[in-house]
Image (tube, helix red, strand yellow):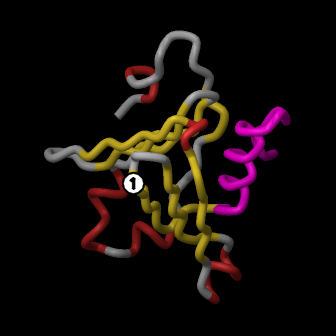
Amino acid sequence: MKISKIIAPGETIIYKPKLSKWAYLRLGSFIRNLTTTIFLSDKRFFHSHGWIHRHAHEIVISKVESILVEQNFWGRIFNYGTIKVSGTGAGTIVLRYIKRPIEFQRQVRAIQGAGTPTLPQ
């Protein structure tokens, strides 16, 4: 899904987390991973996946309550992990095999606070 079709006028994309190459090794999830769209804007967090049957979730940044980052041994070594984003009245969005999960967490907190987030180099 093209991000340009999803963002609202005046909305700015701050960060686009990427899937780790390890996500594509799981054959059962290959198509889902190819059709996944994830972005963090100045207003919301958005996650969509699916080709024929699409699932789209979003949480307004001000409603994000917690961001849980889980990394196993290999995730720590290769810098990928699972992110669980919980929002008020929005449930929990689970993202698996995300590259640099701590950077995602830092970007959300920067948007929620007074700091200005920046894209990593």
* Residue at 36% over, 57% down: 33
What type is the residue that disc 1 sits on?
Answer: Gly
Q: Is residue 46 above or below residue 100?
A: above
Q: Is residue 102 above or below residue 78?
A: above
* Residue at 49% over, 72% down: 22
As helix, strand or loop, the secondary structure at mark 1 comes to: strand
User: Is residue 76 located in the magenta-colored stretch of the structure?
Assistant: no
* Residue at 85% over, 36% down: 115
**Mark 1 surroundings: few (<14), some (14-19) or many (≥20) residues within 10 A:** few
Write down the residue under mark 1: 91
**Quadrant housing residue 117:** top right
Instruction: Name the residue at the bottom extreme.
Output: 73
In the figure, is residue 51 to the left or right of 116?
left
Whole-percent x, y for residue 120 in the image: 78, 46
Give whichever of 45, 52 is nearer the camera. Answer: 45
Give the residues in magenta.
Answer: 100-121
**Quadrant housing residue 71:** bottom right
User: Is residue 105 located in the magenta-colored stretch of the structure?
Assistant: yes
In the figure, is residue 22 to the left or right of 65?
left
Quarter containing the N terminus: top left
Instruction: Name the residue at the left extreme.
Output: 52
Give whichever of 108, 91 is nearer the camera. Answer: 91
Give whichever of 9, 80 is nearer the camera. Answer: 9
